[in-house]
């Protein structure tokens, strides 16, 4: 919530193929990107959970630098209601950004709503329960076909662009023989990554995180301060772990700790009492799925 010597404000970067999806952009995110070795030009989407400063105060700086890029960049921005108005005010309070084009969309979802889809993945969002309009997001990679090279080699099929057709689920003919698509490919389940920012426990977080490979959730406090969590509309680690449990998520990464915690053992233990595969995030943590 508040930057400390060890921890910056909130931001999570998801790299997928040529895309870079930034979930929130707290103050100091650009500099964190420098240290993490993520070029700013890699950001193609910015998904804003809510307009509390610890989640958005890095947007102006990031866009300002991106706006000076040599080739023009496009960033799709999504956020809760009033995001267009707030972005308008933000952009009017800094110098113009000649080389970055922004496409801004607002969501005010009832239940889980799909807000983006392309060939490879979809993005869904759902409203959370915080003391400001706040939404959580899920990135869902589509299931895909992978080529069974062992089978193809047996048939004498060589590697090459014709394999793309197989991946798209279409048969090919190789030296007069039709390649059986069922034997030549096998399905691979897409990954699902969910980002739940500031909220109290809510059903939408569970719906959003259903069967997630990775749930990234706020956990501002351990259970010993549950009263504070309720007072400020936040989750305890145990509550975040219950969400992971009920959703059938595979892995839980906790973040957004109150600055009162100098170490994260208490938070991690609190979560693990309910959901074993839980870890506390640290700045520059990398997870490959
Ligand atoms: Zn926050
Ligand atoms: Zn907040």
Image (tube, rainbow, N blue to C red):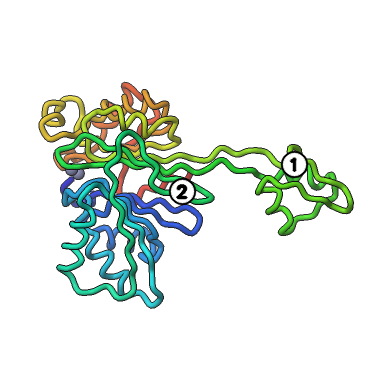
Residue at 30%, 76% (x, y): give it: 98
Q: Is residue 33 above or below residue 107?
A: below
Residue 161 image position (x, y, % from top left): 71, 59
Residue 190 image position (x, y, % from top left): 53, 40
Mark 1 C-beta closer than 8 Å to ligand 1: no
Judged by depth in the image, the label closer to the viewer, 2 or 1, is: 2
Tell me how far mark 2 sits from mark 1, CA to CA. Answer: 26 Å
Q: Secondary structure at mark 2?
A: strand
Please tell me which residue lies in front, 210 or 286: 210
Residue 246 image position (x, y, % from top left): 36, 23
Please tell me which residue lies in front, 148 or 254: 148
Residue at 16%, 34% (x, y): give it: 233
Q: Secondary structure at mark 1?
A: helix
Residue 133 image position (x, y, % from top left): 20, 42
**Which residue is the site of mark 1?**
181
* Mark identifier at residue 129: none
Q: Residue most toward the bottom?
A: 70
- Left or right of 178, for residue 252: left
* Mark identifier at residue 117: 2
Q: Is residue 235 visible?
A: yes
């Amino acid at each position: 919530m508040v930057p400390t010597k060890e921890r910056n404000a909130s931001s999570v970067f998801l790299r997928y193929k040529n895309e870079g999806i930034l979930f929130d952009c707290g103050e100091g995110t650009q500099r964190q990107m420098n240290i993490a070795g993520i070029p700013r030009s890699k950001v193609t989407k910015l998904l804003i959970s809510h307009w509390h400063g610890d989640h958005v105060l890095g947007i102006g700086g990031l866009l300002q630098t991106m706006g000076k890029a040599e080739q023009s960049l496009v960033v799709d921005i999504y956020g809760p209601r009033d995001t267009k108005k707030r972005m308008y005010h933000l952009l009017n309070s800094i110098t113009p950004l000649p080389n970055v084009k922004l496409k801004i969309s607002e969501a005010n979802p009832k239940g889980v709503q799909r807000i983006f889809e392309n060939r490879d993945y979809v993005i869904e969002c759902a409203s959370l329960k915080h003391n400001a309009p706040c939404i959580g997001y899920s990135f869902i990679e589509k299931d895909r076909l992978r080529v069974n090279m062992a089978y193809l080699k047996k048939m004498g099929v060589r590697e090459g662009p014709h394999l793309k057709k197989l991946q798209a689920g279409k048969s090919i003919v190789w030296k007069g023989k039709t390649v059986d698509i069922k034997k030549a490919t096998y399905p691979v389940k897409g990954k699902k990554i969910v980002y739940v920012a500031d909220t109290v426990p809510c059903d939408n977080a569970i719906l959003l995180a259903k069967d997630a490979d990775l749930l990234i959730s706020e956990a501002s406090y351990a259970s010993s301060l549950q009263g504070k969590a309720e007072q400020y509309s936040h989750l305890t680690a145990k509550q975040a772990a219950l969400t992971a449990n009920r959703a059938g998520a595979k892995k839980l990464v906790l973040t957004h700790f109150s600055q009162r915690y100098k170490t994260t053992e208490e938070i991690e233990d609190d979560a693990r009492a309910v959901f074993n595969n839980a870890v506390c995030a640290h700045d520059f943590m990398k997870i490959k799925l």
